[in-house]
Every structure is written in structure tokens, then in C-alpha cells.
Amino acid sequence: MKKNLAWILIYGLPLPLLLVSLMIGPSPDLQLGDYTTTAARLLKGMGVEADSRPALVVGIIRNIRLPRVLLTFMIGAGLATSGASLQGIFRNPLVDPYVLGISSGAAFGAALAIAFPLLSINLSAFVFGVVSVLLAYLFAASRANASIVSIILSGMIVSGIFTALLTIVQFISDPFKLQAIVQWTMGNLHHASWSKFNQAVIPVGVGVIGIYILRWRLNLLSLGDDEAKAVGVNPNRDKFLLIALATLVTTASVAAAGIISMYGLFVPHMVRMLVGPDNRRAIPANIFFGGSFLLLIDNFSRSMLQFEIPIGIFTMLLGAPFFIFLMKKNKINWV
């Protein structure tokens, strides 16, 4: 019964939630009947007249809500999947893109592009996200190898460095760009558009699909390097490839929506509690549940009050109590 409920929650929720989310937004004049009437006309093959109410509904959904809903789902799926893959690689349930400095590096790169538009935001975020990972490995390197603990500690150091650099960019920016950077660092989706979706869909899609294809190797990497080598797997090569894919996903997500705190940390825990630690099942579950859960949070963030609350604030408020609960229950592990 519990297993069936988990599968329904993970794979049955996305489509209804996507449809409901198209009807949520700051348009108080539109009622449920407007959506049903418009949908009925379109299903019957009837067009909508210009300047009519159905045309208004179609315009709002097509140009405003649909790109936001798709972008939110995609970013949620990407962050959850990249977080789960990093936790599997480093065999540590407290690892996420922030621990390796990926998010902080990408955040600095995107803020730098906003303040001094020499590069595009996506390209700058990706470049500095890659630089952060390389620095983490460089700082952790001891002779030929770098231990997991040293890489994590180095990632935290790199994250602190880029956070400080981000603060410097904010300090020297003019007031208008400073406001944009501050709002962006809180994690915002209110600027979602088809252009942002088109810029993010390829890198996020490539990263998520790549991690999905390699999901069975995560099980071997989770056992340790010696065990992986025993079955003919090159752990260093696979780690490099999976970290590169997670970096690609994280940097594209940060460039599109800003910093969505703790999401890639606590959602993989929720998925493991539902489907178990086997990454062959957990990775696809993270894709669907991660997208649905962030979309659900976004619906609350833009409908609870008369003004929109940055989604990064919601994820932080949800993530912290969730980890307190896990600590009390002693469930911060792989099962």
C-alpha cells in the first residue's frame, strides 16, 4: 500500500499539477469558468475571437504561465537530480551543489554578468561554476588523489570565497543592478519567459538525461572505488562525467532562476524515503517528484499573499525543519 502510494505521488502527480498550475496566478478577474470555457472551445476545434475573454485566457497561459510552469518543473527536476547524483558520488547524504561550490560559483558568475554585461548570464554562470569545481579539486588534491572528505571541505571553502566575491559585486554595483542581483540571489521565477526556458532547456535536459543514463553506475560508486573497480568500472572517469553533468544542470538552473536554497539537498532525502536508495529507481523519481514539488512550492509563493514571495525563501523554510526532523528521527542516512 505504501509503495503504491509513493508511485502514485511521484508519477501520477506531475500532469494534474501542471494543468492546475496554469490556472494559478495574479489574474483575479479570471474565474474557473473562463478556463473551462476556453478549453472546451479549443477541444471542439473552435477558434477564439480577438479581444474576447477566451483570447485573453489563451494569451495569459501561452505567454506568461506556461513558460513559468515548464521552467519551474525543469529546474526542480534538475536540482533534485544533480543533488541525488552528487550524494551518490561522494557517499554523503549532506552533499549538494552548494557544498562543492557549484551554486556559489555560478551565482557569482551570473551576478557579475548582471553588473558588468561582458558575457551572457548563462555563459558566465557556467564558466564560474566549472571554475569552482576545478578549484575544489585543486585545493583538495594530495599527490595523485583527493579524498572525499577533503573535496567536500575544499568545496565549502570555495563556496565561501565565491560568496564573498558575490558580496563585493553587490557592494560596487549601482542601485538598480543591485536590486536585480539581490532579488535574483533569493531565487525568483517571476521573470520566467520563453527565452529563459529556451536558454536553460538544452543544458538542463542534457545533464538530467545523462545522469539518468548513468544512474546504475551511481550504485557502484556509492559502494566505494575498490568495489567499482572490481566490476570493471573506472570510478574516476565516471565521477568526472557525473560531476560535469551535475555542474551543467546546476549552473543553467542558477542562471535561469537564481539561488534556490537547499532544494538539491533535502528533496533526494524525501525521494529515498519514498522509493529507497537504489538509484535506478531514485533518479527517475527525483526527476518527477523534484519537478512537481518545486512547482507546488512556486504555486504557494505566488498565490499566498498579494505579492510574490521569492521561492528560495520557501525552500529554505521547508528544508531546515525537514532536516531537524531527520536529525530527531536519526534518519540522515541512505535508507
Image (cartoon, helix red, strand yellow):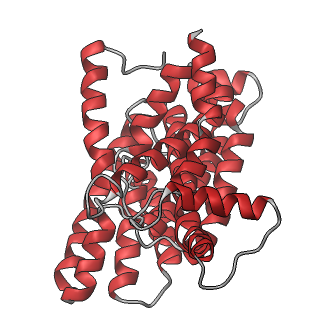
- Above or below, comparing residue 26 to residue 263 in the picture: below
* Viewer-nearest residue: 240 or 36: 36
Q: Could you tell whether 57 is left or right of 299 in the image? A: right
Q: Could you tell whether 88 is left or right of 162 in the image? A: right
* Viewer-nearest residue: 2 or 41: 41
* Viewer-nearest residue: 53 or 136: 53
The reply to whether residue 256 is visible in this rendering is: yes
Which quarter shows the N terminus? top right
* Residue at 75% from the left image edge and 41% from the top image edge: 213
**Residue 178, quarter of the rendered image:** bottom left
Q: Could you tell whether 56 is left or right of 238 in the image? A: left
- Above or below, comparing residue 33 to residue 115 in the picture: above
Residue 294: give x, y in percent of width and height: 46, 47
Residue 279: give x, y in percent of width and height: 63, 28
Residue 196: give x, y in percent of width and height: 55, 73
* Residue at 27% from the left image edge and 52% from the top image edge: 313
Hey, which residue is sitting farthest top in the picture? 1
- Above or below, comparing residue 294 to residue 70 in the picture: above
**Residue 224, quarter of the rendered image:** top right
The reply to whether residue 225 is visible in this rendering is: no
- Above or below, comparing residue 237 to residue 270 in the picture: below
Residue 24: give x, y in percent of width and height: 46, 56
* Residue at 61% from the left image edge and 42% from the top image edge: 16
Query: For the image shown, how many numbered marks are present on the structure?
Result: 0
